[in-house]
Image (tube, grey):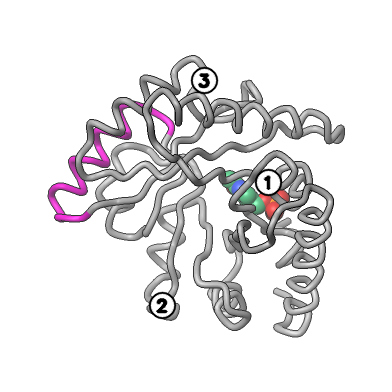
Amino acid sequence: MITLDEFIINFTNIKLRIEKACLKSKRDVSDIQLLPVTKTHSVHAVEYALHVGLNSVGENRVQEVKEKKPLSSESCRWELIGHLQSNKANEAVRLFDRIQSVDSLKLIRKLNTACEASEKVLPILLQCNAGKDPNKFGFSEASMSEALETALEAPFLKCEGLMTIAPLDEDPTSAKACFERLRTIRDALSSEFKLELKELSMGMTQDLEEAIAAGSTMIRVGSALYGSRA
Ligand SMILES: *Cc1c(COP(=O)(O)O)cnc(C)c1O
């Protein structure tokens, strides 16, 4: 685990990358939220994030958050960014403030039922496999309209936008195409359903510049902040 001083240097560098990307695409830095991804790291990673004024963290496993959350500051918001098995919907609803990785109709229904039981409205994002990567979860582009319709029929879920993960590729043009695709899908859904769908969660350590250029409102950054997870 890196030290707090090292984290602050990494955080400063990420902010510079965000600023440069915003200058280039004429966007306002305040329109892009940085979600620190603390998965596999200890609770110190969460405390570092809170120390520099970030108020949410991204995690990909229910079990890990179950262990970390009781040890962390109560002010922290937890976002799920990894695939969720629908039999863990109840637990996830209890642990997370938002679920970004909603990737099946079955999961939408299970989450809605779990929220109803705990009298909670849960913000969600729909994960779209916009890069058509066979190794990634997420709704296909063709099923996004049905997915959103199902989410809108779920009274205990509040769909705030879309999320995607670009295909693993050294060539940044494939991430760029994936992000531009998600933006186009969002714009189409937004006009079809007359909804804002403001959030576009896209971009990670490798490809945050491409994501910001394509309209990302939230970049999810792990290794550039905390070092490698290996
Ligand atoms: C791990 C993870 C990230 C962070 O990835 P880095 O390359 O370490 O920045 C972002 N999004 C999702 C969905 C992840 O699983």
Q: Residues within 10 Å of mark 1 (few under 14, many from 20)?
A: many
Label 1: state its secondary structure: loop
Task: Name the residue beneath numbered marker 3.
Answer: 140
Residue 118 belongs to magenta span: yes
Identity of the residue drawn at 67% across and 57% down: 221
Identity of the residue drawn at 84% across and 50% down: 24
Quadrant for the C terminus, please. bottom right
Identity of the residue drawn at 76% across and 55% down: 22
Identity of the residue drawn at 80% across and 32% down: 169
| Figure disc tally | 3
- Nearest to N terminus: mark 3 or mark 1: 3
- The boundaries of the magenta stretch are 103-120
Q: Nearer the viewer, residue 179 or 44?
A: 179
- Nearest to N terminus: mark 2 or mark 1: 2
Task: Name the residue beneath numbered marker 2.
Answer: 75
Q: Nearer the viewer, residue 82 or 14?
A: 14
- Nearest to N terminus: mark 3 or mark 2: 2
Task: Name the residue beneath numbered marker 1.
Answer: 203
Label 2: state its secondary structure: loop
Report the amino acid beneath label 3.
Answer: Ser
The image shows residue 19, relative to residue 2, as above or below, that is: above
Report the amino acid beneath label 1.
Answer: Gly
Image position, residue 112 (x, y; %): 23, 40
